[in-house]
Image: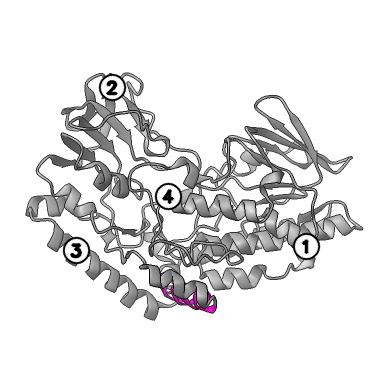
Amino acid sequence: MAKALRDVGVDDITVLERSTEVGGVWRDNTYPGAACDVPSALYSWSWALNARWPRTYSGQADILDYIQKTAAEQGLLDLVHTGQEVTAARYDAEDRTWTVTTAAGATFEADVVINALGQLSNPVVPDLPGLDSFDGPAFHSARWRHDVDLDGRRVLVVGTGASAIQFVPGIVDRVGSMTVFQRHAPYVVSKPDVEYPARHQRLMDRFPRLLGTERRSVFRITELLNSALEGESVLTRKPVMKFLENGWRLQLRQQIRDPELRERLKPDYPIGCKRILFSNDWYPALDRDHVDVVTHGVTAVEPAGVRTADGTLHEGDVLIWGTGFSATDFLGGIRVTGRDGVDLGSVWSDGAYAHLGIVVPGFPNFFVVYGPNSNLGGSSIIGMLEAQSGWIAQVVQRIAEGPFPALEVRADVAEAYDREMQERLGDSVWTQCDNWYTDGSRISTNWPGKVAEYQSRLASVDWSELSPA
């Protein structure tokens, strides 16, 4: 976002970062095996292609290094104020300015506020009876305790999502025993991950155009998955989803010897309802003699372990929560007050919505990056973020140049867009999914189309959709 603003000549930019350094989820998630499930050729900025990725799907340390180096090379780190946890933002209609307040009591005045909190920043731990009573170390995967020795310990893992399928194989050889608590089994297909030889990197260095070719090729492949999920083309959906389901079924059969365990690892929902996961070592990790998979729900935490719905107490020495993030909380605990004292959290009480996933009526000069209905079931979120940043930069440039110091989206435009989103999502695979993607009365997370369509719609601002505030 800061890069896009600089590109259009906006240079009075302040980035408030609650942590001590930049890096986001790739700074916070340091658990064993942490890596991206999107190929690095596509999970990177289009304006900072990297010939030095070490493998197809890069790990946490390499991605964090890329983010921090890119920010430094672009001269963006000087804009960042670390240790600034924002708690509130309030609009003054008379002055047409925003006042942003931090947890430490500092205030910042701004003409424009851009919420770039992300959707995977705040870990979720279920509110269970006795949550804090466990005698041993207990932590979320996004707050990994590297000081906790897992060697030979009895480890309890709650959750089988995208993080768990990486850290469970990463620690399985160290622990004495492991119990994995599974609420809904994921679809896990093979991950075509290879380490790049030195000659690959030399080739990319010598012929930079190859980086663009590689990126475009990966993009086209991932758009097939988006097309299958979004439901516009039944001809695309059926063969793609069937291909993935067959791949999952084959991998499950080949890697899980025990037929009874194989049955427990079969999802109870149609493929595509939850994000399809990629791993070559998840099933082999669960097929170990010292690993047990429990499908009864966890009902309580006790000093000795966790108790499940069948009444069994599963004892352990270490408890690890692999329970994901609050992906539908687009405000992250920040109170945003717009024109006429309207609270954005109240506006979104029945489910978040925003025109283009970016702007909400009644909140002039306030923008959201990675907002409602801009998440993906496939492909790379980077393409969505760049499209949003470019659109916002155009609007901020117009605000800076005048004649109107404040702009907001028209209410009828936002309502029409929300109707379009819900109607299109109603024809997608996600409607079969028992409300996993919903927030209140609407599906608030996913974009119902291809990335290319979103990029096209945001390439230039339709100024008739905005009005002076």
Give the residue pinned by disc 4.
60
Which residue is depicted at the point 79% across and 66% down? 463
Residue 178, percent from left and from top: 19, 37
Residue 123 lies, with reference to residue 240, above or below; the image says: above
Residues at marks 3 and 1 touching, judged by CB atoms closer than 8 Å: no
**Which disc number belongs to residue 445?**
none
Give the residue pinned by disc 3.
251
Marks 2/4: CA distance? 27 Å
Q: Does the magenta segment cover residue 437?
A: no
Magenta region: 209-225
Nearer-the-camera pick, 239 or 397: 397
Q: State the predominant SS element of the stretch in magenta.
A: helix
Position of 155 compared to 35: left or right?
left
Label 2 vs 4, first from the N-terminus: 4
Marks 3/1: CA distance? 49 Å
Marks 1/2: CA distance? 53 Å
Give the residue pinned by disc 1.
8
Residue 242: quadrant of the picture: bottom left
Residue 64 lies, with reference to residue 49, above or below; the image says: above
Res. 370 in view = no
Give the residue pinned by disc 2.
136
Q: Amino acid at mark 3?
A: Gln
Packing grade of label 3 (10 A; few <14, some 14-19, many >=20) is: some
Task: Find numbered disc 4 in the image and state the secondary structure of the residue it sits on.
Answer: helix
Label 3 vs label 4, nearer the camera: 4
